[in-house]
Image (spheres, rainbow, N blue to C red):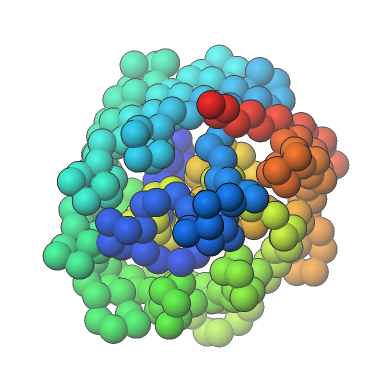
Amino acid sequence: MRRILSLLILSLFFVQCSSDDNSNNNNNNDPIDPNPTNLPKLVAFEVGPNGTNVQYEYNDNDLLEVWTETLPGFGFEITTAYNDELNPNVWYYIDSDGVSDQKGFFYDLEGRVFRYLDAQDDVTLFYDNDTVLFEGIIDEVADVSGSMTLTAGGKVSRFNALDQYLTFDYDASGNMTSLNQYDNNDVLIHSYGFTYDNKNNPFYGQYNPLYLVRNIDLFWNFNSINFTGFSGYVYPYNPNNLTAITRDGVITTSYLIGYDNDDYPAVISEVSQGNSYQWDILYITE
């Protein structure tokens, strides 16, 4: 269950923590233009290889409410409840094995998460200008602590954990372009690179208030890239669509994307470690 819940901690990259951040405006239209040329689209289904099927449902504010995923021999559903400010308040998780859990998020007066907890985590965050400290229980390990350094735009530029630290770079659009992993003696362990198209990422714009929570979940015990590809709401913080991943300068994963008439991804062919996969994305139509 922890593996699934880790993938579902939906927390790169423009931190927005007020109620205005949940408009899901993942396009470049002028909001006062009466005839926008590229309306935002909501993903209804991802149909993947080997019988993988993901379905998404949204509330009246176009915020992700129900995520149902079916894998070979397994399935789960996660339902999100929102508070009055339209920030995620509780996740309710249940899977086909009968395992259930819930994850609660608590916000300060500025709309920032200051605590989150579930069966295996109880973490408190402290904000000090461009530094965010965190401490508590992570993966059932008590009395742990770390920190994140933020850019002026609110993106995580450095993540400090127990025995390593990570640094991040971004392009002008806000896409993560590099992740560098160092040990505590400043020795580079691995360097990862990411390239993107210039089209709208249809998953971008959800779960913005959980951005820092997501960073803690992904990078506390980081040892490999596990937040790319699909399901797309695992990591909905890059404005554009991923086209390639490199590790120490060598391409490890590439994506060939076919777009619909609105320039949104419709068919994605993924090649990773010599294996090929295809994902079809279907959108809500009105």
Where is residue 221 drawn, in percent x and y? Answer: 45, 58
Q: What count of labels does the image hold?
A: 0
Left or right side of 277 for 46 = left
Residue that appears at 61% across and 69% down: 173
Where is residue 231 drawn, in percent x and y? Answer: 57, 37
Residue that appears at 57% across and 69% down: 174
Q: Which quadrant would residue 159 be assigned to in this image?
A: bottom left
In the rendered image, which quarter contains the N terminus? top left
Could you say which is closer to the camera, residue 282 or residue 121?
A: 282
Residue, far front: 34
Left or right side of 74 for 265 = right
Q: Which quadrant would residue 193 be assigned to in this image?
A: bottom right
Left or right side of 10 for 85 = left
Could you say which is closer to the camera, residue 13 or residue 70?
A: 13
Could you say which is closer to the camera, residue 261 or residue 108?
A: 261
Residue 114 visible in the displayed image: no
Q: Which quadrant would residue 123 be assigned to in this image?
A: bottom left
Residue that appears at 80% across and 69% down: 249
Residue that appears at 68% across and 27% down: 48
Residue 167 visible in the displayed image: yes
Residue, far left: 109
Where is residue 219 drawn, in percent x and y? Answer: 47, 61
Where is residue 11 drawn, in percent x and y? Answer: 40, 54
Is 120 drawn above or below residue 21 in the view shown? above
